[in-house]
Image (cartoon, rainbow, N blue to C red):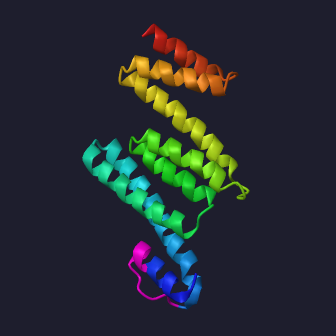
Amino acid sequence: LNGRDFRSLLRLNTGVTEPQGGISVTPSIRRQGFNDGIKNIHDAQQLLDAGAKEEAASTFAVAITRLGKARQLRSGNAQTVRNLATAYALGGDFNGAEKLLRTGITECAADTSAYILTDALKTVRANKSAALVDAKKYDDAIDYYIELTMQEQTNPDLWMGLGNSYYN
């Protein structure tokens, strides 16, 4: 990036108008957004535990914004993608989390910790299917479990979930 584009990116993502000390400010801004996003996830979970669903939802939204900015400043970082997907999933947006993780698996292929995205995708899918059953959306759960069992035919948990969905 040239200096003007870098300043525009900083202003867009952080509100900082001038880099301090040159381009080396980017990692600290990304870390701050990342750390703040993680703190927001933790705070939102505590709010959920206390029964404050609306306040938790807005705190998850703040976490998504902060982690999204951190992701823009350092694309290809599997840990940031995973935590952003976690914020989506805990906020109830399983589709958004799943889409982000699928994109992240490709985007972060060069990251040595990219395997965590595959594991997170499995967890998000399991939670999404369980949420469909809990919401008594059995037809949707059956369709989703069928899709998942075709992708992971040796996963007994998926077959059990499919059977439970048919039973209910």
Q: Is residue 159 something one can see in this rendering?
A: yes
What is the magenta segment's predominant secondary structure? Answer: loop
From this view, report whether residue 4 is shown above or below residue 131: below
**Side of 56 relative to 95 (left or right):** left
Residue 102, given in percent of the width and then of the height, sits at 58, 45
* Quarter that holds the N terminus: bottom right
Q: Toward the viewer: 142 or 131?
A: 142
The verdict on residue 18 being magenta is yes
- Does residue 59 lie above or below 31 as drawn? above
Residue 52 visible: no
In the rendered structure, the answer to whether residue 63 lies left or right of residue 50 reads: right
Residue 80, by quadrant, is bottom right
Q: What residue is at 49 percent from the left and 54 percent from the top?
A: 84
In depth, the one of 142 and 30 nearer the eye is 142
Position of residue 56 measured from the top left corner of the image (x, y, whole percent): 32, 49
Q: Residue at x 49, y 71 (%)?
A: 32
In the image, which residues are magenta? 11-20
Residue 33: x and y in percent read: 47, 68
Which of the 4 image quadrants contains residue 76?
bottom right
Identify the residue at image location x=56%, y=89%.
22
Residue lying at 52% horizontally and 71% vertically, measured from the top left: 30
